[in-house]
Each structure stands twice: as structure tokens, then as C-alpha cells.
Image (cartoon, helix red, strand yellow):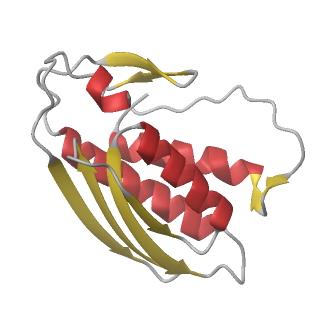
Amino acid sequence: HIFYAITPNPSPPQPRTSTLTRSTKETKISCTLTLYPPTPSQKISTGLPTFDLLLSTFFTSSLISARISCSGDLWIDDHHLIEDVGISVGKCILEVLGDKKGMNRMFWYGGCVVDLSNRPEFKCDVEWEGSDIGGVSIEMFEHFLESLANEARVT
């Protein structure tokens, strides 16, 4: 579990919550994340079922409760919505992590090395098959993670 792994104190910390609303010409997003919730739960609605599943799986395995709802210009493509969700989630993660005092700076999570470095960077060496997963273009999964890493200020 991602955030229990980065907290050296063996007893669960108090819940921390961050809420953000982001509106652009292309999207409107509401995002609330709770780090260390008593019971993690997800309510995610992006208009892209495969992306909803990815987000729900990520947050469930991280023991984070997430409430994300958004609307956007999906009739054009998925780019703006997925990018803006990454930006919103990253900003919420940055806020719930706070000053990161008492947390282990580096950890391994699901095949990824994560560094709470305050120096954002994202690299992906996955060799994807096909051009999309469930109707979401492959490049957008990587773009989501890049946007999240930039805003959360993690490597």
C-alpha cells in the first residue's frame, strides 16, 4: 500500500483530505482525495469506463479514497479530460502529502520506483501492444501519469 509504505510510524496516521475543482474551456473536474481514510472507497466518473477502472484500481491499492467527477469535450478526443484529471489528481496528492515530514522519500510501488523528490519527472519503459485499451489511446495513459507526476512533484 503506497502511502502506508512511505510512513515509518506503524500506527495509521490521521486522515488528510484535499479537494480541488478545475474548470477550463474543455473540461470541468471535481476531485477529492483522502489519504489514510478509515475505509477507502471510490466514486469515479470520467465518462471513460476504462480510465475510471484504472483510477479506481490505483486509488484502492494505494488505500486512498477518491471522489472524481468530470465532464469534457470527449466528442473531440480524450486528451483534455485525461490530462486535466492528471493535473487535478497530482495537485491533490501534493496537498495531502503536505511537507512530507516523517515519510520515506523513496519507495517501490507496483513495478514503479517513486521518489517524493519535489523534482517532477516521469519515464515509462512499457512496450504497449495495440493503439488503445478499452477505447483510451495508449499515449494518454502515459500522459496522465506524466501530468500527475509533474503536479504532485514526484519522480
Which residue shows up at 51% across the image and 53% down it?
Answer: 55
Q: Position of residue 83 (x, y in %)?
A: 54, 60
Residue occupying the far right of the picture: 130
On screen, residue 75 versus residue 54, left or right, reads: right
Q: Quadrant of residue 135?
A: bottom right
- Quadrant in the picture for the C terminus: top left
Which residue shows up at 21% across the image and 56% down it?
Answer: 18
Work out whether residue 119 can be spotted.
Answer: no
Q: Position of residue 133 (x, y in %)?
A: 78, 53
Instruction: Identify whether 136 is placed above or below 94.
Output: below
Which residue shows up at 48% across the image and 83% down it?
Answer: 25
- Quadrant in the picture for the N terminus: top left
Work out whether residue 23 can be spotted.
Answer: yes
Label count reads: 0
Residue occupying the far front of the picture: 39
- Viewer-side residue, 155 vs 111: 111
- Viewer-side residue, 15 vs 106: 15
Q: Position of residue 34 (x, y in %)?
A: 24, 51
On screen, residue 7 versus residue 139, left or right, reads: left
Instruction: Identify whether 44 is placed above or below 100.
Output: below
